[in-house]
Image (cartoon, coloured by chain):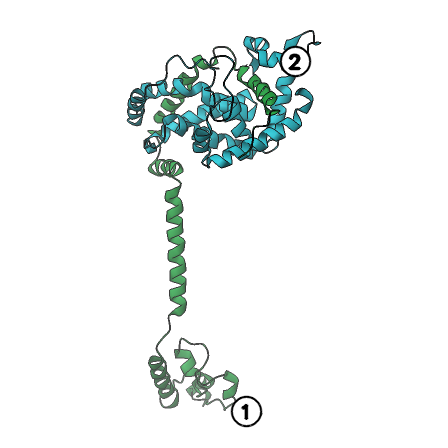
Amino acid sequence: MSEPAPDHETEPAPARPVIRAATAPDPNEEQSLVRRSQQGDLAAYDELVRRYQERVYATIYHMTSNHEDANDLAQETFIKAFQAIKTFKGGSSFFTWVYRIAVNKTINFLKQRKNRTHMSLNDLDFNAEHDPDLVALVSDKTPRREVSLAELQEKLNAAMQKLSESHRLVVTLHDVQGLPHDEIAEIMGCNIGTVRSRLFYARQQLQAHLSDYLK
Amino acid sequence: MHREDPNFDQLRRLLKLKRHEQPPPRYFNDFSTQVVARLQAAQAASAYQSWWQRLWAGLELRPVVPVALGTALCGLLVVGAVYTDKATVPQELLQLSSEDSSKLAGNDANPLLPAVAQADFGFASAATSTNPVPASGSLFDLIQPGGNVPPVRAAHPLFR
């Protein structure tokens, strides 16, 4: 998963430079792909899917903590996006528009599922145990750090599932995926003040649930 | 404006763990291909859909249309119900029909009709009027004191 863009509004300057995406999407090229997709060109739409599949999948996965559900919902998101692509007028970026579809689909799914949470967590990549921020959180007395990281992962996901959908979403979009407040507000259909309030409350809740793991 | 609590720094570091969660290897290699395959299958299936199935699919994409239609239909029903309730027959027509019925009952009695029906209880106006209540008031006002009911005229030839 690529490193998300830093949030310059609230976070201090990062200790190491953030690696941005090697190829930033060209707006003109994207408009051309959208136009062709609106005319039914599936090859053009395939390219659009490839551009955003990881981020859309990641958002849904962090909301559901279930790989299988995330897979189904991500596919359904892109299918619905294609079926409704003729209604896309370009008022927002295509990325924001698809994100909104993904978010609405996921929240509807979670509300139908109610409290029947079943986690199916993805594995941590190799870089996790070498991430200095994560290493600092793991006890030095633990002989195998990867075991502790797995436990942290499970506790973190369980705590995320205790949040309401809207609070979980704002933490996912900001603290996990690094989206700025204004973009989150556009995706969620609320104002920036609401985003900040929900973020603060969600962090308070998570901190309470994870107090044993935060030194 | 909420101040950044320094304790949130540790929480944010912990949340970075979620960035390291990855789907199975090569998961995204086939993802877009599967999406396109499903779209192609849906397009092929829609070619065999009936017109109402295509209409329903279109309405599902634009829910505002059926909502607007339903609202308009409900509005028409309400307007129709209100208009029907306020509709009344003019009083002149009621009186005219009452007079005609009285003439029929008093002079040219229909031998086949029971005499009670032909008696002038004011029912004629009730029978011809759209208003179920006689113009003269209660039906019981027309009954003579003592409960006497005018005798039945055996006008039919069979009863002579």
In this picture, residue A169 sits left or right of residue B34: right
Tell me the green chain.
B
Residue A119 position in % (x across, y down): 60, 23
**Residue kind at label 1, given as amino acid type:** Asn
Q: Which residue is mark 1?
A: B148
Badge 1: residue crowd in 10 Å (few <14, some 14–19, many ≥20): few
Q: Residue under circle 2?
A: A138
* Residue at 42%, 87% in the rendered image: B157
Of labels 1 and 2, the one closer to you: 2
Q: Are marks 1 and 2 on the same chain?
A: no
SS state under label 1: loop
Q: What residue appears at the point 46 percent right and 26 percent down from the top-left corner?
A: A180
Is mark 1 in CB contact (under 8 Å) with mark 2? no
Q: Chain of mark 1?
A: B
Where B10 sits versus A143, above or below? below
Q: Amino acid at mark 2?
A: Val
Image quadrant where one finds the C terminus of chain A: top right
The answer to which of B104 and A141 lies nearer the viewer is A141
Q: Give the residue drawn at x 46%, y 79%.
A: B133
